Image: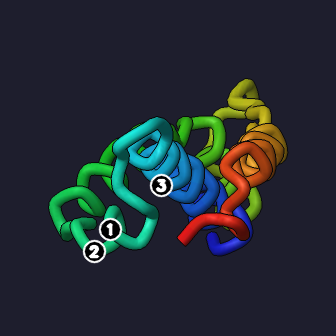
Amino acid sequence: MDQGVISTFKSYYLRRTFKLLLSETDGQDKPTMLEVWKKFSIMKAIKIISDSWEEVKPSCMNGVWRKIWPECVHRSAAGVDGTPAVRHEISNLARESNFEGRN
């Protein structure tokens, strides 16, 4: 499961977290990244978790279950792993934001 569903979920969560940080720190008179993190709440984390989990497609679940228990997965349920594209987007977001230069 770790290499499938959990890895995919983590990618979605990280992308959403980066987008949140960028949106809240991008522009004039916006708080710094440190100020945003200080105000980051459990409620925001739960919202990101919920939204990220909704992005996990049935095809991802089928791909994992096919490896564990192939009899329970429909043969026609072939999935496409979107994780590489999400990881590429995360890299671009990190580069765009210049996280190293922010405080």
Q: Quadrant of the N terminus?
A: bottom right
Q: Which mark is residue 69?
A: none
Quarter of the figure with residue 59? top right
What residue does disc 1 label?
Answer: 35
Residue 83 visible? The answer is no
Q: Amino acid at mark 3?
A: Thr
Q: Secondary structure at mark 2?
A: helix
- Residue drawn at x 46%, y 52% is 21
Task: From the top left corner, tell me how far across and down residue 103 is, in percent.
Answer: 53, 72
For image coordinates 72% across by 69% down, the residue present is 100
Amino acid tagged 1? Glu
Disc number lying in front (2 or 3): 2
**53 in relation to 27, above or below:** below
Residue 8 location, x and y as percent? 64, 55
Residue for badge 3? 17
In this picture, residue 100 sits left or right of residue 5: right
Left of 54 or right of it: where is 97?
Answer: right
Residue type at mark 2: give it. Answer: Lys
Q: Residue at x 16, y 60 (%)?
A: 43
Task: Report, in whole angstroms, how far the alpha carbon at label 1 lies from the one at label 3.
Answer: 15 Å
Identify the element where label 3 is drawn.
helix
Residue 5 vs residue 11, the one in the foreground: 11
Camera-side residue: 21 or 77? 21
Query: Disc 1 on helix, strand or loop?
Result: helix
Of marks 2 and 3, which one's residue comes earlier in the chain?
3
Q: CA distance from mark 2 to mark 1?
A: 5 Å
Q: Which mark is residue 38?
A: 2
Is residue 73 visible to us here? yes
Q: Is residue 1 left or right of residue 84?
A: left
Query: Do residues under tags 2 and 1 come within 8 Å of each other at their CB atoms?
Result: yes
Instruction: Identify the image quadrant of residue 46.
Output: bottom left
